[in-house]
Image: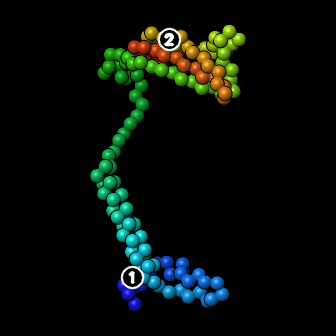
């Protein structure tokens, strides 16, 4: 018996001939594939462990209230784009304007707001609103 024959993990997968008794035997080709499988499994496990040990970084993230951050940063300014999709909700009136039933409050955001754009789509409504140099206020 060969070395490859002795490590065949697939002996139940051989000798499928009709009307002959099933003979479970270890073969050289089964041993070679078993050896390839075992080597690849060990390589994958080792690479996962190495990747875990090298790239394992502990990250702690939390949401910090803006009131606390005001002592460290004087103001938060960014360009802001708001996209809202409402399913099965019409948002454009007969004149092509946003329907009266749609309103957005921008009280806590100071900046240059573009006009709200409303588009009816196949699924419902899409709203788009842009703010340039938008300053995010306390309580936003």
Q: Where is residue 126 drawn, in percent x and y? A: 60, 23
Q: Residue at x 61, y 89 (%)?
A: 21
Query: Which of 15/80 is in front?
Result: 15
For marks 2 and 1 on the same chain, the one whose residue lies earlier in the sequence:
1
Q: Which mark is residue 42?
A: none
Q: Residue at x 31, y 21 (%)?
A: 72
Residue 98 is left or right of residue 11, and the answer is right
Badge 1: few (under 14), some or many (20 or more) residues near its Cα, within 10 Å? some
Q: Can you identify the residue that label 2 sits on?
A: 114
| Dot in front, 2 or 1 | 1
Q: Is residue 110 above or below residue 87?
A: above
Circle 2 — which element? loop
Question: Do the CB atoms of the residues marked 2 and 1 lie less than 8 Å apart?
Answer: no
Q: Residue at x 42, y 25 (%)?
A: 65
Can residue 133 be seen here? The reply is yes
Can residue 137 be seen here? The reply is no
Query: Which of 64/112 is in front?
Result: 112
Q: Is residue 4 above or below residue 134?
A: below
Q: CA distance from mark 2 to mark 1?
A: 73 Å
Q: Where is residue 115 drawn, in percent x and y? A: 53, 10
Single out the residue that lies furthest toward the left.
Answer: 54
Query: Which of 36/138 is in front?
Result: 36
Q: Can you identify the residue that label 1 sits on?
A: 4
């Amino acid at each position: 018996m060969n070395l490859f024959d002795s490590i065949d993990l697939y002996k139940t997968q051989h000798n499928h001939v009709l009307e002959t008794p099933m003979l479970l035997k270890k073969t050289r080709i089964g041993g070679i594939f078993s050896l390839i499988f075992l080597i690849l499994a060990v390589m994958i496990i080792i690479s996962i462990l190495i990747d875990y040990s090298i790239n394992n970084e502990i990250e702690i993230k939390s949401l910090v209230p803006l009131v606390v951050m005001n002592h460290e940063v004087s103001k938060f300014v960014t360009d802001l784009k708001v996209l809202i999709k409402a399913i099965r909700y019409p948002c454009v009136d007969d004149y092509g304007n946003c329907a009266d039933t749609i309103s957005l409050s921008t009280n806590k955001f100071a900046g240059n707001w573009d006009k709200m754009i409303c588009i009816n789509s196949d699924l419902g409504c899409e709203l788009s609103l842009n703010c340039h140099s938008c300053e995010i206020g306390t309580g936003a």
